[in-house]
Image (cartoon, coloured by chain):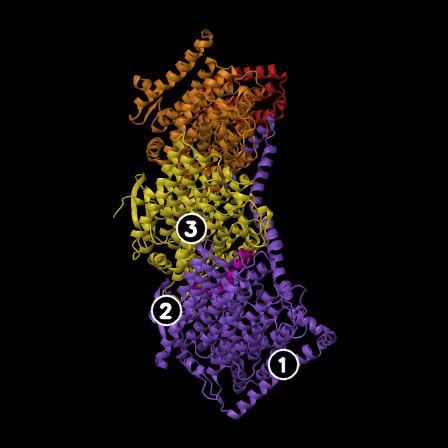
C-alpha cells in the first residue's frame, strides 16, 4: 500500500483508533469524566468527517487491487454513517446516564459499527463485504444487549445474535457459491464471469443466498422477523441507530453488489425484489397498524420504509439509485428524530413507550410534539417534508422504469401508513393527558430535533441540492 | 309611463323592503302607510300603463323593455325585461287593484297582530313577484315571479307559524308547487332547446311561422305544452296537484283572498294563455288541459258541497272556478279564460273578504254549522257577499254570468258537448254550494257560541267589500256576448292572442247562444232554489240525504282521499326508501361498511401478522429458512 | 469436487435444520458454526478446483470472524443465563406480536 | 395598476400571518384573533384586485407568475401560479369565506386559540394555492398540504367522534390523491420527462407533440378523476363527508363545504378535461349517471337525517352531483353553470354551516328534533336562515337558481333523461330544506329556546356579506358569468378536439348507454 492509499483509509483509522482509545479510557474515568468519553467519540466523528471532506473531489480511487473503492458512492455513505454515528452518540448521552449504561464501550462500539458500515459501502469484494457486515453485526449485537440487567435488552441481543449469525452463515455460503461460480469474489470479476455468455449454474443460487443475507440486514420480508423484537428490546438509542445505520449500510452493499457485480442478472433480481418490495411494504404497514407500543410501531414502520427504498432498486435506473440515496438521508433524519423523541420520553427503565404515554403531549411539551409531528408527517410522505420528496422521486423512478403497478401499490401502502403515523398525532394532539406534568428533554436532543425539523422542511422544499449530490454520488456505481 | 315600467313592480318591492327590514321598529301606522301607499301607487302606475296602452293603435299595443342581461352563458341568455301588452296590462290591473283593496282591508283585519309589519312585508313582496310574473318578457323571468309568488304564498300560509297546521300547510303548498315548477322549468328548457331563445317574442314568432323545428301538432310542441301545463296545474291547483290549496286556508283570510283566490292561483291560467301560441298548436295538450280543467271543476264543486269550514268551501270553489278557466283555455277560448279570471278575481276576493269579515265578527269561528242569522248583524257583509254569490252562480247581469256563459258557449261552439253538459252541471252545483254557504251563514237562527256578539267590521274592511261588490256587479259588461253587443274585452285582448292558431269556428246563431244563456241562468236558479229548500225551508233534509248516501258523503267530505293516497303512495314509501333502504342499508350498510371494511381487513391482516410474530427465535429462523427456499425456488422457476 | 460440494451442502443443511430443531442456545450456535464450516469447506473445494489460493485464505478469515462471533455470542449467553437461569431459546419470548 | 406577484401575496399572506401568530407567545387571544382576521381580510382585499383587473375576454391565464422552484438538469418544477375564468371566483370564494370562518369562531373556539387560527390560515394558503397552481407538482403539494390543517381542525376542535372523522377524512382523501400522484408522475414521463407545467403539457397535446393511447388516457383520467371524485364527493365516494361535517367545528365545516369540495370539481375542469378529453368524452355518460344518482340519492338521504349538519352534508352530495353533471354536459351553459354553482354552493352551504353553528353555540345540540319555534325568539336569525335556505333550494332571484338553471339547460340539451332526473332534485331539495326549516323555526314557543336570543352584531356582520352576494349573483349574474365565458369556451374547444370532426360523434357519444340518441339543437 502506498501512502496515497493509506490517506484514503484515514477516516476509518480515526474511528477505530478512537474506539480503542475509548476502551482504554473507560476503566480510568470516573463518573464526572464521562462527558469526556462522549466528547472523544464525537470528536473522532468530526475529525473523520473532515478527513472525508478532503477526499471529496479526488475522483474515484480504489485500494487493495480494487477491493476497496473510494468514490462518490462510498464517500456519500461514509459521510451518512458518520452523521448517524455522531447523532446516535449525542442522542444516547442523557439516556445512557439515566439508565446507568454510560460507558466508554458504548461509544467505542458505535465507532466500530460505523467503520463496519463504511467498509460495507466501500467494499467491492464479497469477502470484504462479509467482514464489514460482521464488524457491524458484532458491534450491534453487543449494543442491543447493553443494558445487561434488563431482560428485554438481553432477549433482544440474543435474538439478534442468533438470527444474525444464522443469516450471516447463509450469506457466507452464498459467497462461497458465487466464488465457485465466478472464480473470484471481486465484483468486477463476477460481472465479467456473468457477462461471458452462459451464466454459471451456481451464480443464481449464490445470488439468492446473498439476497437473503443482505435482505436480513435490511429487514426485507420474509427475513424481517427479528426487527420488531430486537428494536423493541434494545435500548432506545441503539434502536435509533439500528433503524438507520445498518439498514443504510446493507442497502449500500446491496446496490454495490447488484449494480457492479450482477447487472447481468438484473431481470432475475428485479423480479424477485419487486415481489419482496411489495411484501415488505404491505406486511410492515399492516402489522404497524395494530401496534400500541411506539417503538414496535416504529420498528414495523422501518420495515415498510425499507420496502419503499427497495422500489428504487427495482427501478434499476440512475434515477432510482439517486432517489434511494436521497431518501436514505431523509429517512435518517426523520427516524432519528422520531426515536430521539421516543428515547427522551421513555422515562426510567425505557418503559413509557406506549401510545397512551403520548396522550396530550402537545400540551405537556409543545416543541417535542411538534418535532415528532413533523417527523411523522415526513414518514407518512406529506408534501413540504423531505419524506414526500423522497417518495416522489422513488416512485417516479419506478414509473419511469415502467413499474407503474409497483408505484400504485407503494402509494396505497402510504395511505395505510398514514393511519398509524397519524394515530400518534391523534394521541399527541387530540387526546387529553391523563396525568399531565411537563416533559423535559435534554438540550442536545432538543437541538437535534430543531435541526431535524429544519432539515426535513429544507429537504421537502428545496431538495435540488441534495438530489444533485445524490446524483453525483451514484456516478461511482459502475 | 312605459319608460317607467320598471317602477311598477319596484314600488311594492321597496315597500316590502322597508316593512321587512325596518318594520319591527316602525309604528303600525307607518307600516300601514308604507304598505298601502306602495300597493296604491302600483295600482296607479298600472292604470297609467293601461291607458297609455289604450292610446296606441291595437296593432302597436306591445311594449317591450329590456333592463339588463340577467343570465348569459354560451347561447343561453335571459334578460330582465318586461313585456306590456293587453294581456299583461289586464293582469297587472287586476293584481294591483284587488291587491290594493285587500291591503286596505288587511289594515283592519290584521290590526291586532303582533307580526303586522311582517304580514305587510310579505304582501308587498307578493305584489312585486306577481307583477314580475305577469310583466315578464321571457319565460325565465316569468319563472322568477312564479317562484316568488310561491315563496310569498309559503310565508303567508305559514304566517301563524306557531300553529303546526299552518306550518305544514305552507310547506305542503311550496312542495306541491315545486312539483309543478319542475314541469314548468322542463318546459322552459324544452322551449330553449327547440327555439334557442327564451324571449316570448322570438319564440312565439317562430312558432306562429309554423317553424320547421316544431310544426303544429308536433311532439315537441305537445311535450312543451304539457310540461308547461304541469306547472300551471301546480300553481292553479288542478288535479292532481290541487291538494295544497284547501290547506292553504290556514293563512290569514286576506291572504286567502289575494293569493289563493284572486291572483296567484290564476297565474297558471295566465301562463297558459300567454303561451297560447304553443297550446293552440298542440291539440293533444289542449285536450289534456280541457279534461283536467273540467274534471277539476266538477270534482271541486262536489267537494265544496259538503265542507263545513267557510273558507274551505270557498277554496274548493276557487279550485272549481280555476277548472272552468282551464276548460276555457282547453276549448281555445283564451280570452274567455282571462275574462273569467278577472271577474272571478273580483267576486272571489269579495267572498273571501266577506268570509273574513264574518270570521272576524265571530272571533275566529270558521265552521258554518256555528254561524247563522248574521244577516242583520252584518248587513254590509251580507249584501256584498250576496252580490258575489249571485255573480259566481252566474245570475244575469252580474259579472260571473257573462264570463261563465262565454266559457260554456265556447265549449259548445268548439264542439265539446260533454264539456258543456259537465260545465252546466258544475254551474248548478256552484250555485248550490254557494247559497248553502250564504244560507247557513246569514239565515236561520244563530248557532254561534253564547257570549259572542257579532258586529259589523270597521270601515277599512267594509269599504273594500263594497268596491269589490260594485266590480262584481258591473265588470261583466265589458265582455258582452255577441247577442248583446260587442265583446270589448276580447277585442282588447286580441293583440296578445294574435299568434293563436284558430280553427274555423262554426257559425251558430245568436238565438241559440241566447237560449243557452237562459238555460244556464235557469240551472243556477235551480241550484239556488235547491239550497233554499235544503237549508232554509227544511233544514233537516240535508242530514237525511247524508244518511242515505253515507259512502258518497264520506268520499266527498274526505275530498276523494287524495291526501291519504299521496301519503300512502308517495310520501311514506319515499321516506321509507330513504330512511331504511338508502340511508341505513345502502349508505351505512354497504358503502360505508365497504370503506371501513377495507380498513378493518388491513387491521385483520395486521392481526394475523401479529400472530405470526410469536417471539420464538426458532420459528423466526424457520421463516428465514422458508424464505430462503422460496427465493431459490423463485429464482430458478422464473428464469427466462 | 462434487463430493466435497455435496458434503458441504449436507453440512449446511444439517446446520440449518439443527438450528431450528435444537432447544439450547449453545447448540444452536454450534449449528451456526457448522454452517460456517460448510461454507469453509465449499471455499476450499472451489479454491482447489480453480487452482487458486484465494479461497483458502478466505477460510482463515472466516475462522477469525467465527471466533469473534463465538466470543460475543458466549458473552450474550452468559448474560442471558444470569438473567433468566435458562438457555432455552423458547423462553426468550417476552416480546412478540 | 399592476401588482407584481399578486397571486403569491394572496396565497402566502395567510401562511405568513399564521407564522406570526405562532411566534407571538404572549399575545392575548383577542389580539391573536384580530391579527388573524386582518390577515385574512388583507388577502381578501388583494383578491378583489384580481376581480377588478381580470380580462374577461381572454381565456389565457392571467396574473401569471412563474419562477423556478426545484431545478434539475433534465427538468424543473416551477412555482407557477395563474388564474383564469375558472379559478378566479374560486380564489375569491376562498378569501371571502376564510375571514367569515374566523369570525364565526370568535366565541365558540376558546381552547387553543392560537393553533386554531393558524390552522385556518394555513388552510387558506393551501386552498388558494390549489386554485392558482399551474404546475402539477405544485398543485399536488398544495392539494395534500391542505389536508393537514383540516385534519387538525376536525381532530382537535371537533365533536364527539372527531377522531374517527378526522382519520377517515384523511385516509379517504389521501387514497385518492396518492393515486393521482402516480398519475402525475406517469404524465410527466409520458410528456417527455422535462416539464410538470400544465399549460405546456396541454399545449403539447394540442400541437400533437404528445398523444395518448386510449388505454393510457383512460387510466390517467381515472387516476386523476378518483382523487377529484372523492373530494367532490361523487357518489359512491361520499361517506367521509357526513362524518367530517358533523364532527368538524363550525369554521371547519364552512371551509370544508364552502371551498374544499370545490377543489374536486375544479380539478376535473382544470386537469381532467384538457389533459384527457378523449377519456372525458368516453366516460361522460357513466360519470353523469353517478352524478344523477348522487343528486337523487343525496337528496333522499338528506330528507331523513335527524342531525342538521348531516342533512346539509348529504345535501352537498346532491348539489355537487349537479355540478359534476353540469361539467360533463360539455355545453357552454352547462359548464358555466357548474362553475357558478360551485361558488353558489360555497356561499349557501357555507352560510348554512355558519347558521347551524350559531344554533349549536347556543343550544349545544344539532338534532333537528330538539328545536322548534326558534322564530319566536330569534326573528332576524330566522329570516337569515330562510334566505340561505331559499338560496340552497335555488329560488329564482337568489344565486342558486342561476347555476341550477344553466346546468339543467346544459344537461337537458345533452340528455333529456338526465336533465329531467336532475330537475327532480329541485323538488327533493325543497322537501328536505323546508322540512328542516319548519322543524327548527316554526311551531309553538319552546321553553328550551328561552335563552336563545337573537343573533348579535358580529353574527349579522358575518351573514350580511353572504346574503348580499347571494342576491347579487341571483339578480345580476352577468359580471360573474362574463368572466368565465372565454375560459369555458377554451376548455370546451379542447374537449371537442377529441371528438371526431362534424360533431355528431359528440352527441351520440354522450348519450347514456342504452338510450337512443336524442335530437339536440
Give the chain coloured red. C
Q: Residue at x 61, y 61 (%)?
A: B571
Segment colored magenta: D409-435
Q: Alpha carbon of mark 3 to alpha carbon of mark 1: how far? A: 58 Å
Q: Position of residue B320 (x, y in %)?
A: 57, 75
Say which residue label 3 marks: D464
- Which quadrant of the figure contains the C terminus of chain A? top left
Q: Identify the hue of chain D.
A: yellow
Q: Identify the hue of chain B.
A: purple
Mark 2: which secondary structure? loop
Q: Of B455 and A478, which appears nearest the observer?
A: B455
Say which residue label 1 marks: B528
Q: Of D132 and A474, which appears nearest the observer?
A: D132
Q: Residue at x 45, y 8 (%)?
A: A29
Mark 3: which secondary structure? helix
In front: label 2 or label 3: 2
* Residue A272 vertical position relative to residue A138 in the rendered view, above or below: below
Give the chain coloured orange. A
Amino acid at each position: 500500500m502506498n501512502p496515497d492509499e493509506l490517506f484514503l483509509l484515514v477516516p476509518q483509522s480515526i474511528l477505530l483508533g478512537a474506539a480503542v482509545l475509548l476502551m482504554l479510557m473507560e476503566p480510568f474515568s470516573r463518573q464526572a469524566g464521562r462527558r469526556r468519553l462522549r466528547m472523544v467519540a464525537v470528536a473522532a466523528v468530526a475529525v473523520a468527517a473532515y478527513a472525508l471532506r478532503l477526499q471529496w473531489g479526488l475522483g474515484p480511487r480504489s485500494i487493495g487491487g480494487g477491493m476497496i473503492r473510494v468514490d462518490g458512492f462510498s464517500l456519500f455513505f461514509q459521510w451518512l454513517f458518520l452523521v448517524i454515528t455522531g447523532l446516535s452518540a449525542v442522542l444516547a448521552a442523557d439516556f445512557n446516564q439515566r439508565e446507568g449504561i454510560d460507558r466508554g464501550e458504548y461509544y467505542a462500539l458505535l465507532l466500530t459499527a460505523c467503520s463496519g458500515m463504511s467498509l460495507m459501502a466501500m467494499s467491492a469484494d464479497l469477502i470484504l463485504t462479509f467482514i464489514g457486515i460482521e464488524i457491524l453485526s458484532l458491534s450491534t449485537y453487543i449494543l442491543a444487549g447493553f443494558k445487561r440487567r434488563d431482560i428485554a435488552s438481553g432477549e433482544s441481543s440474543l435474538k439478534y445474535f442468533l438470527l444474525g449469525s444464522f443469516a450471516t452463515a447463509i450469506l457466507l455460503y452464498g459467497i462461497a457459491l458465487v466464488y465457485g461460480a465466478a472464480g473470484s469474489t471481486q465484483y468486477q470479476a463476477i460481472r465479467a464471469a456473468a457477462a461471458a455468455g452462459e451464466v454459471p449454474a451456481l451464480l443464481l443460487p449464490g445470488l439468492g443466498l446473498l439476497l437473503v443475507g443482505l435482505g436480513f440486514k435490511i429487514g426485507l420480508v420474509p427475513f424481517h422477523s427479528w426487527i420488531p423484537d430486537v428494536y423493541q428490546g434494545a435500548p432506545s438509542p441503539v434502536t435509533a441507530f439500528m433503524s438507520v445505520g445498518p439498514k443504510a449500510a446493507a442497502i449500500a452493499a446491496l446496490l454495490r453488489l447488484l449494480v457492479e457485480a450482477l447487472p447481468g442478472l438484473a431481470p432475475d433480481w428485479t423480479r424477485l425484489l419487486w415481489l419482496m418490495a411489495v411484501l415488505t411494504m404491505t406486511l410492515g404497514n399492516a402489522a404497524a397498524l395494530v401496534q400500541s407500543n411506539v417503538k414496535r410501531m416504529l420498528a414495523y414502520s422501518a420495515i415498510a420504509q425499507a420496502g419503499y427504498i427497495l422500489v428504487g432498486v427495482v427501478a434499476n435506473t440512475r434515477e432510482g439509485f439517486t432517489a434511494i440515496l436521497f431518501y436514505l438521508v431523509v429517512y435518517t433524519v426523520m427516524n432519528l428524530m422520531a426515536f430521539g423523541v421516543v428515547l427522551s420520553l421513555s422515562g426510567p427503565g425505557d418503559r413509557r413507550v406506549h401510545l397512551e404515554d403520548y396522550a396530550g403531549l402537545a400540551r405537556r411539551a409543545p416543541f417535542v410534539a411538534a418535532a415528532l409531528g413533523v417527523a411523522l408527517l415526513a414518514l407518512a410522505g406529506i408534501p413540504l417534508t423531505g419524506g414526500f420528496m423522497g417518495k416522489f422521486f422513488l416512485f417516479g423512478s419506478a414509473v419511469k422504469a415502467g413499474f407503474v403497478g409497483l408505484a400504485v401499490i407503494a402509494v396505497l401502502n402510504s395511505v395505510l401508513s398514514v393511519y398509524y403515523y397519524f394515530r400518534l398525532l391523534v394521541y399527541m394532539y387530540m387526546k387529553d393527558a391523563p396525568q399531565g406534568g411537563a416533559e423535559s428533554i435534554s438540550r442536545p436532543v432538543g437541538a437535534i430535533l430543531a435541526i431535524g425539523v429544519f432539515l426535513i422542511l429544507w429537504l421537502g422544499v428545496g431538495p435540488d441540492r441534495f438530489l444533485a449530490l445524490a446524483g453525483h454520488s451514484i456516478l461511482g456505481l459502475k | 309611463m312605459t319608460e317607467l315600467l320598471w317602477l311598477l313592480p319596484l314600488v311594492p318591492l321597496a315597500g316590502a323592503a322597508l316593512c321587512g327590514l325596518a318594520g319591527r321598529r316602525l309604528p303600525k301606522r307607518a307600516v300601514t302607510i308604507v304598505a298601502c301607499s306602495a300597493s296604491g301607487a302600483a295600482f296607479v302606475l298600472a292604470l297609467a300603463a293601461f291607458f297609455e296602452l289604450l292610446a296606441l293603435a291595437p296593432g302597436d299595443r306591445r311594449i317591450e323593455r329590456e333592463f339588463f342581461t340577467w343570465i348569459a352563458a354560451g347561447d343561453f341568455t335571459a334578460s330582465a325585461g318586461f313585456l306590456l301588452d293587453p294581456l299583461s296590462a289586464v293582469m297587472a290591473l287586476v293584481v294591483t287593484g284587488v291587491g290594493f283593496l285587500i291591503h286596505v282591508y288587511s289594515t283592519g283585519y290584521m290590526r291586532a297582530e303582533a307580526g303586522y309589519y311582517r304580514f305587510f312585508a310579505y304582501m308587498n313582496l307578493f305584489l312585486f313577484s306577481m307583477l314580475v310574473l305577469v310583466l315578464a318578457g321571457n319565460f325565465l323571468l316569468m319563472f322568477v315571479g312564479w317562484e316568488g309568488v310561491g315563496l310569498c304564498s309559503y310565508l303567508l300560509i305559514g304566517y301563524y307559524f306557531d300553529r303546526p297546521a299552518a306550518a305544514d300547510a305552507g310547506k305542503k303548498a311550496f312542495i306541491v308547487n315545486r312539483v309543478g315548477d319542475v314541469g314548468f322549468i322542463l318546459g322552459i328548457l324544452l322551449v330553449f332547446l327547440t327555439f334557442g331563445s327564451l324571449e316570448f317574442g322570438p319564440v312565439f314568432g317562430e312558432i306562429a311561422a309554423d317553424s320547421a323545428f316544431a310544426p303544429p301538432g308536433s311532439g315537441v310542441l305537445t311535450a312543451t305544452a304539457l310540461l308547461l301545463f304541469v306547472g300551471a296545474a301546480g300553481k292553479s291547483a288542478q288535479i292532481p296537484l290541487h291538494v295544497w290549496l284547501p290547506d292553504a286556508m290556514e293563512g290569514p283570510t286576506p291572504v286567502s283572498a289575494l293569493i289563493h283566490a284572486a291572483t296567484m292561483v290564476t297565474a297558471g291560467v295566465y301562463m297558459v294563455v300567454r303561451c297560447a301560441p304553443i297550446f293552440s298548436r298542440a291539440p293533444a295538450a289542449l285536450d289534456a288541459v280541457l279534461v283536467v280543467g273540467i274534471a277539476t271543476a266538477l270534482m271541486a264543486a262536489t267537494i265544496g258541497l259538503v265542507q263545513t269550514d267557510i273558507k274551505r268551501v270557498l277554496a274548493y270553489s276557487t279550485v272549481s272556478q280555476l277548472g272552468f278557466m282551464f276548460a276555457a283555455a282547453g276549448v281555445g277560448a283564451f280570452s274567455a279564460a282571462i275574462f273569467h279570471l278577472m271577474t272571478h278575481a273580483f267576486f272571489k276576493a269579495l267572498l273571501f273578504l266577506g268570509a273574513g269579515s264574518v270570521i272576524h265578527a265571530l272571533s275566529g269561528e270558521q265552521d258554518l254549522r256555528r254561524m247563522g242569522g248574521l244577516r242583520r248583524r252584518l248587513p254590509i257583509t251580507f249584501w256584498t257577499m250576496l252580490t258575489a254569490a249571485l255573480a259566481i252562480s252566474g245570475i244575469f247581469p252580474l259579472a260571473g254570468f257573462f264570463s261563465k256563459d262565454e266559457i260554456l258557449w265556447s265549449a259548445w261552439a268548439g264542439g265539446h258537448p260533454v264539456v258543456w253538459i259537465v260545465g252546466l252541471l258544475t254551474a248548478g252545483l256552484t250555485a248550490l254550494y254557494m247559497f248553502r254557504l250564504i244560507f247557513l251563514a246569514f239565515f236561520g237562527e244563530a248557532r254561534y257560541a253564547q257570549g259572542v256578539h257579532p258586529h259589523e267590521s270597521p270601515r277599512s274592511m267594509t269599504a273594500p267589500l263594497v268596491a269589490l261588490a260594485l266590480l262584481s256587479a258591473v265588470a261583466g259588461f265589458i265582455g258582452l256576448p255577441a247577442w248583446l253587443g260587442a265583446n270589448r274585452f276580447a277585442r282588447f285582448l286580441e293583440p296578445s292572442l294574435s299568434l293563436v292558431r284558430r280553427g274555423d269556428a262554426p257559425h251558430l246563431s245568436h238565438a241559440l247562444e241566447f237560449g243557452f244563456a237562459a238555460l244556464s241562468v235557469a240551472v243556477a236558479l235551480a241550484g239556488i232554489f235547491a239550497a233554499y229548500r235544503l237549508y232554509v225551508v227544511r233544514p233537516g233534509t240535508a242530514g237525511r240525504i247524508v244518511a242515505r248516501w253515507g259512502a258518497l258523503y264520506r268520499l266527498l267530505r274526505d275530498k276523494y282521499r287524495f291526501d291519504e293516497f299521496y301519503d300512502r303512495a308517495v310520501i311514506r314509501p319515499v321516506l321509507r326508501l330513504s330512511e331504511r333502504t338508502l340511508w341505513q342499508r345502502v349508505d351505512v350498510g354497504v358503502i360505508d361498511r365497504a370503506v371501513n371494511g377495507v380498513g378493518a381487513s388491513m387491521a385483520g391482516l395486521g392481526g394475523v401478522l401479529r400472530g405470526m410474530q410469536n417471539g420464538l427465535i426458532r420459528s423466526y429462523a424457520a421463516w428465514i429458512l422458508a424464505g430462503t427456499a422460496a427465493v431459490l425456488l423463485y429464482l430458478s422457476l422464473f428464469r427466462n | 469436487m462434487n463430493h466435497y460440494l455435496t458434503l458441504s451442502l449436507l453440512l449446511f443443511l444439517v446446520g440449518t435444520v439443527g438450528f431450528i430443531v435444537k432447544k439450547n442456545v449453545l447448540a444452536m450456535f454450534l449449528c451456526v458454526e457448522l454452517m460456517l464450516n460448510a461454507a469453509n469447506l465449499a471455499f476450499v473445494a472451489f479454491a482447489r478446483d480453480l487452482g487458486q489460493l484465494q479461497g483458502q485464505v478466505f477460510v482463515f478469515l472466516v475462522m477469525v470472524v467465527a471466533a469473534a462471533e463465538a466470543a460475543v455470542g458466549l458473552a450474550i449467553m452468559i448474560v442471558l443465563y444470569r438473567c433468566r437461569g435458562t438457555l432455552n431459546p423458547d423462553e426468550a419470548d417476552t416480546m412478540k406480536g | 395598476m399592476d401588482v407584481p406577484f399578486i397571486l403569491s401575496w394572496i396565497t402566502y399572506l395567510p401562511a405568513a400571518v399564521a407564522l406570526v401568530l405562532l411566534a407571538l407567545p404572549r399575545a392575548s387571544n383577542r389580539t391573536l384573533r384580530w391579527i388573524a382576521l386582518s390577515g385574512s381580510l388583507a388577502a381578501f382585499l388583494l383578491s378583489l384586485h384580481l376581480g377588478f383587473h381580470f380580462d374577461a375576454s381572454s381565456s389565457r391565464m392571467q396574473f401569471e407568475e412563474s419562477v423556478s422552484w426545484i431545478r434539475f438538469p433534465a427538468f424543473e418544477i416551477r412555482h407557477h401560479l395563474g388564474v383564469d375564468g375558472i379559478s378566479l371566483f374560486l380564489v375569491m370564494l376562498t378569501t371571502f369565506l376564510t375571514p367569515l370562518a374566523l369570525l364565526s369562531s370568535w366565541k365558540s373556539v376558546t381552547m387553543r386559540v392560537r393553533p386554531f387560527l393558524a390552522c385556518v390560515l394555513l388552510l387558506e394558503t393551501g386552498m388558494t394555492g390549489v386554485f392558482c397552481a399551474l404546475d402539477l407538482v405544485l398543485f399536488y403539494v398544495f392539494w395534500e398540504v391542505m389536508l393537514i390543517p383540516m385534519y387538525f381542525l376536525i381532530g382537535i376542535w371537533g365533536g364527539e367522534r372527531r377522531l374517527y372523522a378526522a382519520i377517515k377524512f384523511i385516509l379517504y382523501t389521501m387514497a385518492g390523491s396518492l393515486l393521482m400522484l402516480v398519475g402525475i408522475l406517469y404524465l410527466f414521463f409520458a410528456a417527455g420527462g422535462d416539464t410538470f407545467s400544465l399549460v405546456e403539457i396541454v399545449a403539447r397535446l394540442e400541437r400533437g407533440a404528445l398523444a395518448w393511447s386510449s388505454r393510457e388516457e383512460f387510466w390517467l383520467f381515472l387516476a386523476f378523476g378518483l382523487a377529484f371524485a372523492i373530494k367532490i364527493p361523487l357518489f359512491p365516494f361520499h361517506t367521509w363527508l357526513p362524518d367530517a361535517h358533523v364532527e368538524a367545528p363550525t369554521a371547519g365545516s364552512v371551509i370544508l363545504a364552502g371551498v374544499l369540495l370545490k377543489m374536486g370539481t375544479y380539478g376535473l375542469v382544470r386537469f381532467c378535461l384538457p389533459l384527457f378529453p378523449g377519456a372525458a368524452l368516453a366516460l361522460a355518460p357513466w360519470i353523469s349517471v353517478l352524478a344523477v344518482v348522487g343528486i337523487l340519492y343525496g337528496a333522499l338521504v338528506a330528507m331523513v337525517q335527524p342531525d342538521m349538519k348531516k342533512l346539509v352534508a348529504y345535501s352537498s352530495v346532491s348539489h355537487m352531483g349537479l355540478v359534476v353533471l353540469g361539467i360533463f354536459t360539455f355545453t357552454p351553459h352547462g359548464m358555466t353553470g357548474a362553475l357558478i354553482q360551485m361558488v353558489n354552493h360555497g356561499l349557501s352551504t357555507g352560510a348554512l354551516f355558519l347558521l347551524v353553528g350559531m344554533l349549536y353555540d347556543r343550544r349545544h345540540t344539532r338534532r333537528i328534533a330538539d328545536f322548534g319555534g326558534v322564530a319566536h325568539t330569534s326573528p332576524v336569525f330566522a329570516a337569515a336562515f330562510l334566505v340561505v335556505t331559499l338560496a340552497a333550494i335555488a329560488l329564482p332571484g337568489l344565486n342558486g337558481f342561476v347555476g341550477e338553471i344553466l346546468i339543467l339547460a346544459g344537461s337537458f340539451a345533452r340528455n333529456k333523461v338526465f336533465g329531467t332526473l336532475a330537475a327532480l332534485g329541485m323538488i327533493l331539495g325543497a322537501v328536505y330544506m323546508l322540512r328542516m326549516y319548519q322543524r327548527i323555526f316554526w311551531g309553538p314557543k319552546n321553553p328550551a329556546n328561552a335563552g336563545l336570543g337573537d343573533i348579535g352584531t358580529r353574527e349579522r356582520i358575518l351573514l350580511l356579506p353572504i346574503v348580499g352576494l347571494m342576491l347579487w349573483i341571483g339578480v345580476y349574474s352577468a359580471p360573474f358569468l362574463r368572466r368565465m365565458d372565454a375560459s369555458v369556451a377554451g376548455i370546451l374547444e379542447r374537449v371537442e378536439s377529441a371528438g371526431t370532426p362534424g360533431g355528431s360523434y359528440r352527441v351520440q357519444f354522450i348519450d347514456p348507454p342504452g338510450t337512443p340518441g336524442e335530437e339536440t339543437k
